[in-house]
Amino acid sequence: MKLKDIRALASVQGPARTPSERLARRCYSVEDMRNLAAKRLPGSIFDYIEGGGEDEASMRRNRSSFEDWSFLPKWGSVDNLDLNSTLLGGPVSMPLALAPTGGTRLFHPDGESAVARAALDAGIPYGLAHLSTTPMEQVSAAAPGVRRWFNIEPMRDKVELQAVLDRAAAAGYEALLVNVDCRAIGHRERDYRNGFTAPPSIKLKTVVEGALHPRWALGFLANDAIAFPNLDAEVPDGPLSSTPDMWRTLLAGSYEPTDWDDIRDLRARWNGPIILKGVVNPNDAATAAEIGIDAIQVSNHGGRQLDHMASPLDVLPDIVDRTAGRVEIIVDGGIRRGSDVVKAIALGADACSIGRPYLYGLAAAGKAGVAHVLKMFAADMTRTMMLLGVSTIRELRAEGRGLIRHRSEAFSRTLPRESPQARMAYEEMSTP
């Protein structure tokens, strides 16, 4: 090759001028963002994002379940490819929402406000956690145009419940995300080892980690103390302190003996859409549809609560069959690529929701990091749909199971071409 040919091939980029440009040049997947977040955060703080309950089997299964499904692309024209869809009666730029996460300012000083602004720019909804570290009103002011959902647990104290509902409605939250998987706090052993207890404690290890991550430490120390201002029914005058009494109150609330009557009461009190978050049992999904719940979020809390649960994707087909279109279905857990979202939609979901992926982005680069994660998801979905042979989300739903196959289905269909020994082994496994 001649020198002039080498010069023609060479491409020299100038320095990146913005955080978005830097991320575009070095982060090509959620895993890249995860690695960057791991470098930016102290280990104990990163563990809070990463950790699951007990042996973390549910968390691992959430991810591996997507690998059990394979695409069956179809040939044909792909014209005017479009990710736009609807969710809970409103438009979304793609079938994706941001799940509520607690303690978000631990990962970046701008916390929930930065996430809300990124969601607004991307045209998708944002679910704010009851345990958010930013008041719900401040999030509304930071991104007034974003579709806002507020996350609560069922409550037996109806006076307190009504006060929370009134406050959320006044702050412009259009829907409720109601946790039905938090009757007890999961046994998160990583957090216990790192001092993330109730009330929280600071270990020498945490102090040393902070000193080794000065950028994070400076941001943490220069901003308001971490507090949970949405726990009060009324707008708080200032940040709450992390006192033992506050934590005892919080934990006591998680054990309240609520049941379906409390969900019916909540349905009567709230005029907007309600999403039950944490539904994995098809019978519960059918009951939710019968009492007028608008949507369910098929979720095992990211593997952070009960361990050894079925993954949301494993139970999704049964839930779709049992609800028969009477509720909208959102799926979360283990979603790391746009192709995962496409698989869930093909299996009957209306949308997906992500938590850890956008937290990686937030920890890595604030709002720009969250925005970059969402751009990657949109690009992944666009590319996957093009290669799959579908042009719109509506077409993807219509084609559905014709575009995807579980590995067990593929194995059973190849049995006639397998050896007699393989067939015998399969039949033995299938015998009750």
Image: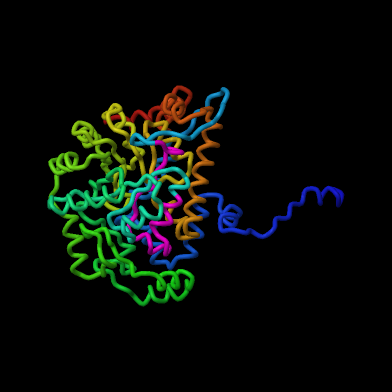
What percent of the width, then of the height, locates residue 424?
A: 38, 28
- Position of 143 relative to 42 (above/below): above
Decide whether residue 99 is among the magenta residues: yes
Quarter of the rendering containing residue 362: bottom left
The one nearer the camera, 379 or 169, is: 169
What percent of the width, then of the height, locates residue 428?
A: 33, 31
| Residue at 33 percent of width and 42 percent of height | 311
What percent of the width, then of the height, locates residue 203?
A: 33, 75
| Residue at 19 percent of width and 60 percent of height | 251
Q: Is residue 122 visible?
A: yes
What percent of the width, then of the height, locates residue 347?
A: 39, 31
Quarter of the rendering containing residue 135: bottom left
Quarter of the rendering containing residue 260: top left
239 relative to 388 in the view: left or right: left
Q: Quadrant of the C terminus?
A: top left
The one nearer the camera, 364 or 223, is: 223
The one nearer the camera, 317 or 80, is: 80
- Position of 279 relative to 130 (above/below): above
Decide whether residue 144 is among the magenta residues: no
| Residue at 30 percent of width and 55 percent of height | 53
Q: Find the magenta span and give its range.
A: 91-118
| Residue at 21 percent of width and 58 percent of height | 234
Q: Is residue 410 visible?
A: no
- Position of 113 relative to 335 (above/below): below
